[in-house]
Amino acid sequence: MKKLIVFDLDGTLAESKSALDAEMATLLGALLRSVRVAVISGGDWPQFQEQMLPALAPDAQLRNLSLLPTCGTKFYRYASGWERLYAEDLTAAEKEKIVGALRQASELAAGAVQETWGARIEDRGGQITFSALGQQAPLDAKKR
């Protein structure tokens, strides 16, 4: 029998930056009763708090659930509440270098994107994320 099952959040358990639907929440809750589950995402901790956790039943076996935001650079586990076990954040100098390079590249490609929704560059601690359409882009625009 499997001891751990690992899922990606966006595009696997839920649509991009969308809440878990009722069926998926029920299936995930049932799985948590029999095996440990880990969910990883490029999104940061608040994305799990908004998108995933509220959909789970109050009696979900959260002790069997591990959450790995920002591509695993952070690790959360449930005890009497959610506890961050580690965060491997970038240094200020690393962030500055990455953000500078992304700004320069996006200026060179300025005409390629007609409309954006929200910030295009986001500091998530352990990663700097570039979203060509912006962090709040609707799902249909992302799919196009």
Image (cartoon, rainbow, N blue to C red):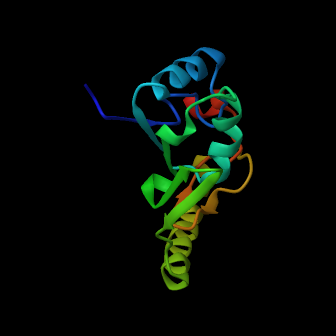
Is 53 above or below relative to 79?
above
Q: Quadrant of the N terminus?
A: top left
Residue 89: % across, % down: 50, 72
Whether residue 81 can be seen here? yes
**Residue at the outermost left position:** 1
Is 34 above or below relative to 54?
above
Residue 134: % across, % down: 66, 49
Is 140 above or below relative to 39?
above
Is 41 above or below relative to 101?
above
Answer with left or right where residue 51 lies relative to residue 84.
right
Answer with left or right where residue 36 lies relative to residue 16.
left
Answer with left or right where residue 125 lies relative to residue 8.
right
**Residue at the outermost front position:** 80
Who's the residue at 45% across and 53% down the image? 71
Who's the residue at 59% across and 14% down the image? 23
Residue 5: % across, % down: 36, 33
Who's the residue at 48% across and 38% down the image? 64
Whether residue 41 can be seen here? no
**Residue at the outermost bottom position:** 93
Who's the residue at 53% across and 66% down the image? 102
Q: Quadrant of the C terminus?
A: top right
Q: Nearer the viewer, residue 72 or 61?
A: 61
